[in-house]
Image: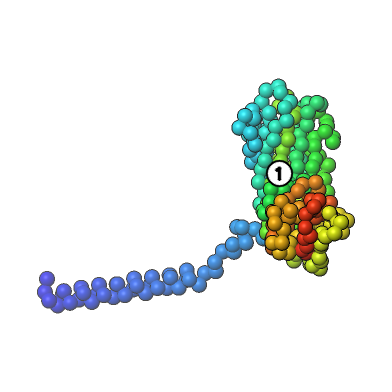
Amino acid sequence: MSRHQIFLVSIISSFVMLAIIFTGWRWLDRVAAAPLPELAATIGQQQTGNSTAFASISAMAFAPLSQDTRFSKDSRRQILSLSGQSRNSSLFVAPLTLPDRSRLTGITVFGEDFDNQGSVRVRLMRCDHGQSRCVTLAETTSTNNFAAGQFETIKVTISNEVVDNNFYSYFLELELTSIFNSGLRSVRLETVGAGGSAPAPGEIERWSLSGAATSFPLPNLEWTEVRVCTDDLSHLDNPTHFPILVVDGESTQLASNTCITTWGRDIEIQRRLNTGPSSGTYQFLR
């Protein structure tokens, strides 16, 4: 091949390469300019305002509290049931992840109950992060409308319960005593709104135990959340002389210069006889 032919081949190759590069740039331009897909179509929209939404929990998500519990999960019937013929009460739990600031409004339970001496009972529980305390927000059972077979409980209404993941965790507790292939199929929770602002807390008030007073009942008239704080208690020579917070019959020993947030109906601060004075503050959070 002559030098002239080699020169022509190199020029043609250069033009071909430039054409390929130019075409690639045009293609990249079109890709970059194309609109990205909307993530909302994949992940769903957040519940807001007064819209109603539902959360469903399958019985397949529940786990027994005791390793000795004999049970079975029928994926065809979608039923969690006890094995054997014993009606000993068996507990199962399923964790919940609820939208923060949404309002819980109702719970409905579905299942099958062929045992007129047992029941399928479900409780919605809320537990404090800061202490070993849980309360039942709602409870329903198959015996409310026992029909010797498939059942759907009447919706239990939950009033004035705003999900607060900052202070609490939530789970479902299933208590099974029915046999003969009876069991739970699913639970449906109803919520309203999400992302709303927290209720405004009340004023900070003082409490005091001195003189003949051994108890200070907090002036709440219904279930409420309260923050109780203590002043400096260093003048009390023994920690057993520190005041006690009693919430619905459950006692918690208070410490010096500390705060406890709790929830209950009957709340009072107590001290034992022959102990020194103590004081602090309380604030109703909602």
Image coordinates for residue 122, horizontal then vertical, percent: 75, 40
| In the depicted structure, whether residue 91 falls above or below residue 207 | above
Residue 152: quadrant of the picture: top right
Which residue is found at the position 72% from the left and 38% from the top?
Answer: 174
Q: Can residue 103 be seen in this view?
A: no
Which residue is found at the position 62% from the left and 59% from the top?
Answer: 41
Amino acid type at circle 1 is Leu
Residue named by callout 1: 172
Image coordinates for residue 40, horizontal then vertical, percent: 62, 61
Which residue is found at the position 47% from the left and 69% from the top?
Answer: 31
Image quarter hosting the C terminus: bottom right
Image quarter hosting the N terminus: bottom left
Q: Which color scheme did the rendering employ for the protein?
A: rainbow
Q: In the picture provided, is 34 more to the left or to the right than 82?
A: left
| In the depicted structure, whether residue 153 falls above or below residue 3 | above
Image coordinates for residue 243, horizontal then vertical, percent: 76, 55
Q: Can residue 69 be seen in this view?
A: yes
| In the depicted structure, whether residue 77 falls above or below residue 61 | above
Label 1 Cα neighbours within 10 Å, binned few <14 / some 14-19 / many ≥20: many
| In the depicted structure, whether residue 235 falls above or below residue 187 | below
Residue placed most toward the observer, 113 or 97: 97
Q: What element carries label 1?
A: strand
Which residue is found at the position 83% from the left and 42% from the top?
Answer: 154
Residue placed most toward the observer, 173 or 133: 133
Image coordinates for residue 123, horizontal then vertical, percent: 75, 42
